[in-house]
Image: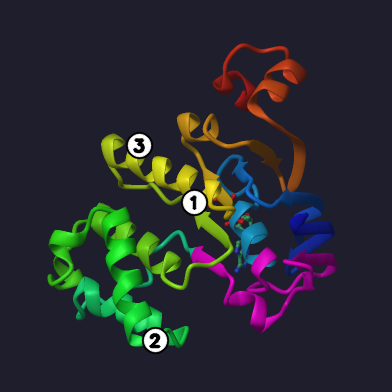
């Protein structure tokens, strides 16, 4: 089943076309990487998938519903490029705040905070004020926050920026485990070794998808031996 279906999407800012006839299908349980140079349209595409950006033409469907659709938003965990956290609150209070937005019960809130904090290795720091967190810790808390309601679809915009390689490795291990549970994950990245971990890549340039496929398929298509060369 297609969890996300993007059909002929065009998005303009003033007269500038930022997404130029995008078509993309994402299947259940797939990790898809959106890869492309800075300014190529990755963030605009993920925001259009959620309905945060109004598209000029085309159609987006998520979980079988036409977007924009508020109900579907409950099933999307979105981690934006910049952290949207309350610096005055502790890590735990931030997670509680987001959990309450989704009307989770008290016991669900406790369970989900425990699970997500463990996932991103922040259990020891939950009672600290977020204003005192490092950049990497804020990134990890944002990831925990976007998982709090146990969404079916995760949309992660450069999730591992500012995260050291060891933790990046453990986050990817968890993303794979989430995939095994049937979650679908869309991730934008500039990091080559992350691209290798995706089931499928969509290469974006100047608002167009120039190729999609697994790393192996893309290497074959472009007749190259490494992922770096695909980017070139
Ligand atoms: N709100 C906006 N108003 C006008 N132009 C915008 C707006 N948001 C993005 N753009 C432009 O749209 C283009 C695509 O931007 P977008 O943020 O989607 O790229 P990106 O691939 O995510 O880049 P990066 O990797 O640097 O995050 C850029 O030229 C950008 O300047």
- Name the secondary structure under disc 3: helix
- Magenta stretch: includes residue 144: no
Q: Horizontal and vertical percent for residue 203?
A: 68, 37
Q: Is residue 158 above or below residue 92?
A: above
- With 127 as the anchor, is 145 left or right in this view? right
Q: Nearer the viewer, mark 2 or mark 3?
A: 2
Tell which quarter ligand 1 is in. Answer: bottom right
Q: Is residue 35 above or below residue 193?
A: below
What residue is at 23 percent from the left and 74 percent from the top? Answer: 92
**Over which residues does the magenta segment extend?**
49-78
Q: CA distance from mark 1 to mark 2?
A: 22 Å
Q: CA distance from mark 2 to mark 3?
A: 32 Å
Q: Are marks 1 and 3 in contact (CB under 8 Å)?
A: no
- For mark 3, what is the residue? 169
Location of the C terminus (image quadrant): top right
What residue is at 78 percent from the left and 66 percent from the top? Answer: 61
What residue is at 32 percent from the left and 62 percent from the top? Answer: 115
- For mark 2, what is the residue? 105
- For mark 1, what is the residue? 178
Q: Is residue 7 above or below residue 219?
A: below
> Pointer 1: residues within 10 angstroms few (<14), some, or many (20+)?
some
């Amino acid at each position: 089943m297609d969890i996300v279906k993007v059909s002929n999407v065009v998005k303009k800012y003033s007269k500038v076309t930022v997404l130029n006839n995008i078509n993309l299908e994402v299947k259940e349980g797939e990790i898809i990487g959106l890869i492309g140079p800075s300014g190529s349209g990755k963030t605009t595409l993920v925001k259009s998938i959620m309905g945060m950006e109004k598209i000029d033409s085309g159609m987006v469907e998520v979980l079988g519903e036409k977007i924009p659709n508020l109900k579907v938003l409950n099933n999307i965990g979105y981690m934006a490029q910049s952290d949207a956290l309350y610096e005055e609150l502790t890590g735990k209070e931030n997670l509680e705040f987001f959990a309450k937005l989704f009307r989770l019960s008290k016991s669900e809130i406790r369970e989900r905070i425990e699970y997500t904090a463990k996932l991103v290795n922040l259990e020891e720091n939950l009672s600290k004020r977020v204003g005192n967190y490092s950049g990497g810790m804020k990134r990890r808390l944002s990831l925990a926050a976007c998982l709090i309601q146990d969404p079916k679809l995760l949309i992660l915009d450069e999730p591992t920026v500012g995260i050291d390689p060891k933790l990046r490795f453990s986050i990817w291990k968890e993303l794979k485990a989430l995939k095994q549970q049937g979650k679908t994950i869309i991730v934008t990245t500039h990091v080559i070794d992350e691209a290798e971990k995706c089931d499928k890549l969509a290469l974006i340039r100047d608002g167009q998808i120039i190729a999609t496929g697994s790393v192996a398929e893309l290497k074959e298509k472009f007749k190259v031996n490494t992922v770096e060369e695909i980017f070139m």
